[in-house]
Amino acid sequence: MKIARFSHQGAINFGIVDDGDLVVLNGDPMFAGYDTTGERVPLESATLLAPVIPRSKVVAVGKNYRDHVAEMGGGEAPAEPLLFLKPNTAVIGPGDTIVRPPQSNRVDYEGELAVVIGSVAKNVAAADAERVIFGYTVANDVTARDLQKTDGQWARAKGFDTFCPLGPVIETEFDLASATVETRLNGSLVQSAPLTDMIHSVPEIIAYVSAVFTLLPGDVILTGTPAGVGFVETGDVVDVEVSGIGVLSNPVS
Ligand code: MG
């Protein structure tokens, strides 16, 4: 099931994508279930928004694909997931503009699978991780690459406003075993990898992360990017696609 958050005629609602329409829900399905209002809104007349606003945090995993570790000159892939945080104020939705900040001369796209947490989670075993997952969406872990290098830690480089596009929908029945993540820059394919190329799997990541942070419903985990990262310029359009979920498209200013 694909869940969207959208605006239509001045109202913001959640809906289930069904045959070109949005079946309008009575509230946020993460908390209110799937009661419908009986109303249907054509997808083409709705504006899709970020499908989740993380209540507390976006946790991200760095260097989780070997070919990306190699392209960054990083030597060995980390034995344990490398964690960092992005503030929830960095989140934007489909079609929203990624703003290159004046502090950076090199802003990169990073196409990624994102996990949306559905329940309070602390010290969750990998075998139980499925229980705390609400669904999956697509993310762009936008990064000021120059500041990532000069700052040493990544709060600024990863945390600017607009640096966490999410969407277009949350897929609640996603199976990543045969899925790919692909990024297109102005229509040209620049990243493509099977999600099974991740070094640390989603259950392993949830176990590791939840041993550090209490995860809250609506928190989001970005699972890392494959090889092919590169910079964006004003006027570019970045499309990140996870097969089975959708395409997250954002212009750059
Ligand atoms: Mg990343």
Image (spheres, helix red, strand yellow):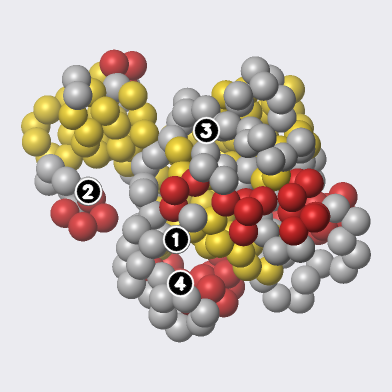
Expressed as whole percent of the image width and height from the top left, the position of residue 59 reads 53, 62
How much space separates mark 1 and mark 4, taking CA atoms?
18 Å
* N-terminal label among 3 and 2: 2
Q: Secondary structure at mark 3?
A: strand
Q: Specify the label residue 129 is tagged with.
A: 4
Q: Specify the label residue 248 is tagged with.
A: 3
Q: Specify the label residue 57 is tagged with.
A: 1
- Name the residue rendered at 36%, 34% in the picture: 49
Residue 142 in the image: above or below residue 187: below
Assess disc 4: are there few (<14), some (14-19) or many (≥20) residues with their C-alpha within 10 Å of its C-alpha. Answer: some
How much space separates mark 3 and mark 4, taking CA atoms?
25 Å
* N-terminal label among 1 and 4: 1
Extreme residue toward the left, this view: 38
Query: Badges 1 and 4: C-beta atoms under 8 Å apart?
Result: no
Amino acid on which the number 4 mark rests in the picture? Ala
Seen in the image, is 73 located left or right of residue 167? Answer: right
* N-terminal label among 1 and 3: 1
Expressed as whole percent of the image width and height from the top left, the position of residue 242 reads 57, 40
Amino acid on which the number 2 mark rests in the picture? Asp
How much space separates mark 2 and mark 1, taking CA atoms?
18 Å
* N-terminal label among 3 and 4: 4
Quarter of the picture holding the C terminus: top right
Amino acid on which the number 3 mark rests in the picture? Leu
Q: Specify the label residue 28 is tagged with.
A: 2
Report whether residue 161 is seen.
Answer: yes
